[in-house]
Image (cartoon, helix red, strand yellow):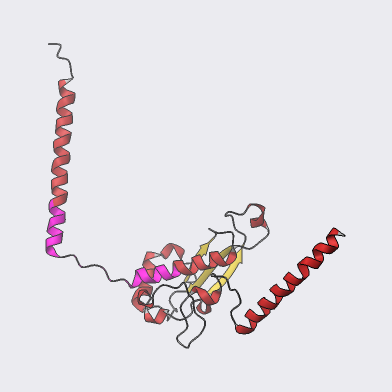
Amino acid sequence: MAAHTLRGLCRPRLGLLAARFSQRAAAGTEYRSAYSLDKLYPPRQDGGAAAASAPPAGDVPPRCRSSLPARLTVSYCRSSGPGGQRVNKVNTKAEVRFHLASADWIPEAARQKMASMHRNKINRAGELIVNSEESRYQMRNLAICLEKIRTMVTEATEKPKVVSKETTQKLIERVEKMNRERLRQKKIHSDIKQSRKADFD
């Protein structure tokens, strides 16, 4: 009797929730995870799906602002990270790779710099491989991989800072001063140790 009454109370609420979800789906405002592929990166230049959490466009080279997932090879496998027995059942570890030499969405100079900076992540086929198993969620690990690639490209396209002669001279003087102070303290410590020695003559 109690179970029957409980079912009767729950049915109107379930129907109301279903109606709300159908309305949102029809309006195109249904819930989407923050780690969905259409939210990870900026919009395509042709007006494709966008990422609300993407960094400002000024931080990314112009040729790299199109959708990255379409240019990469993504695969998943078992993870050794957190998750307990779940890691033995679900492919949560994400691996993203692409051929660096033919990646025309990265400037040539940046590709050469990336090849020297991350040569331990490039296989014999010339593919740059990035993986993540930090999270127990597959899409979050994919987002971490894409963010790593984005950081690599940004670091490779940054121009080195030009240090003025005045700043260089100040740095040299500072180092020399630190060395003189270090030698002075070392001499004081040596004199103290020498004074502790007993003279048997």
Residue 144 shown left or right of residue 195 in the figure: right
Task: Residue at the far right: name it.
Answer: 1
Residue 170 visible in the shown view = yes
User: Number of callouts in the render?
Assistant: 0
Expressed as whole percent of the image width and height from the top left, the position of residue 51 reads: 49, 76
- Residue 173 image offset from top left, x and y in percent: 12, 52
- Tell me the quarter of the picture where residue 163 sits: bottom left
Q: Which quadrant holds the C terminus?
A: top left
Does the segment drawn in magenta span residue 171? yes
Q: Assign the N terminus to one quadrant of the image.
A: bottom right
Relative to 192, does residue 138 appear above or below in the rendering?
below
Residue at (54% x, 64% y) in the render: 141
Q: Position of residue 20 (x, y in %)?
A: 66, 77
Answer with left or right where residue 176 lies relative to residue 83: left
Q: Main secondary structure of the magenta part?
A: helix
User: Is any atom of residue 113 visible in this view?
Assistant: no
Q: Is residue 44 above or below residue 81?
A: below
Front residue of this view, candidates 88 and 101: 88
Q: Nearer the viewer, residue 42 or 110?
A: 42
Magenta stretch, residue numbers: 149-173
Residue at image position (51%, 68%) is 143
Residue occupying the far bottom of the picture: 46
